[in-house]
Image (cartoon, rainbow, N blue to C red):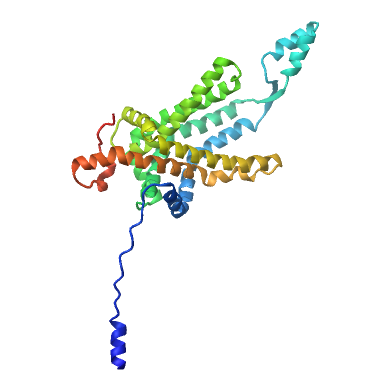
Amino acid sequence: MENEKKKSFFSRKTDRPDAVAEDTTPTLKFFFKLLGRKLGKLMSLNLMMSVLYIPLIVALIVYFFGDTMPTTESALFAPLLGVSLAGGSPTANLLMGAISRPLDVPVLSSGRLIAILILVVATALTWGWQNVGATYNLRSLIRGDSCFLMSDYFYAIRRNLKQGFFFGLLDFSVIAVLFIDLYYFSALADVFWCGVVYVMMIALAVIYTVMRFYIYHMMITFDLSVKKLLKNALIFVMLGLKRNAMALLGLAIVIGANLALIVPCLSVGFSLPLILPLFYLPALAGFIAGYAAWPVIQQYMIDPYQKNEGEDTNESEDALTPPAIE
């Protein structure tokens, strides 16, 4: 009897049903599940992406926190002051009082100017490479592939050395021009035509922001010229309209939440929250954008290619030359 019990114990059935395959459909629910799993690697990747933004932050600190020169907000102050000194008039005095808010303008000495130029040029020269390396890692995290942050980072840069460099210069220049134009026309938005141009610049900035969701992902995945990268990215602005809108909303919520924390703290003299976004925001923003963009690229560029070839090409996906998108 005892032997039968032992036999039944050791011969117990250990067969279990296979685990149910996880639904990896790129929905909003799966986004938060994937984000929780990859949070540690995103934090590490964010440190690697610091080369993208820390030099620019240092350049801004050098620009704003140095010697300043007092001036006024409006260029009309000087002629109105001359009228007032010459004899004055109630109207001139009233206008002068209305536009005479004092401002402190940074003074660019030769040393500060050289330091700023070195920081900006160094960022511009490495801009494309840094984005390529970060995007390669983000794509692996989004697809659930194995991801070795440092080695994959430099592997992607080596594979896209020339195109990453030259497109990085173009990308950096476009962002700089859009930023300067937005800053300039925002100050003149009360003038009708300047207001119209300001709205147009906002629209262009939004469109190019969405295009950037796709450009670097296509660059590391396909063998495409810069012209085709830009063309396809512009097409994807409309093809992925729903996912693009959700990504923009997610970015707005994340940035808004950071501002909601930072602004009240600054008003009471507590500046520590200023540095908190540096530890997570760039990588998180890239993850949100990539999660929105990659399924659209998969649908319109990879799936049709694999269907035409009639075989699985996942192993060589980085070398695909997909059919043109019309």
Q: In which quadrant is the N terminus drawn?
A: bottom left
Q: Residue at x 36, y 33 (%)?
A: 239
- Compared to 161, does 86 lie above or below? above
- Residue 221 seen from this side: no
Residue 164 at x, y percent in the picture: 37, 35
Instruction: Report the front residue among 150 and 194.
Output: 194
Q: Is residue 212 left or right of residue 253?
A: left
Residue at x 65% of width, y 39% of height? 263
Q: Nearer the viewer, residue 261 or 174?
A: 261
Q: Quadrant of residue 101?
A: top right
Residue sitting at the far left: 310
Q: Residue furthest top?
A: 87
For residue 144, side relative to residue 317 (left or right)? right
What residue is rendered at 41% in x and 37% in y? 242
Q: Nearer the viewer, residue 275 or 218?
A: 218
Instruction: Judge whether residue 93 can be spotted in this image.
Output: yes
Query: Residue 90's quadrant in the figure?
Result: top right
Q: Quadrant of the C terminus?
A: top left
Q: Is residue 56 above or below residue 24?
A: above
Count all numbered tags in the image, as a single digit. Answer: 0
Vertical order, 268 against 117 (above or below): below
Which is more toward the observer, 284 or 26? Answer: 26
Residue 48: x, y in percent?
A: 46, 45
Specify whether 189 is left or right of 247.
Answer: right
Measured from the top left, where is residue 309 in percent x and y?
A: 19, 42
Residue 303 picture location, percent across and down: 27, 42
Q: Is residue 270 above or below residue 324?
A: below
**Residue sitting at the far bottom:** 1
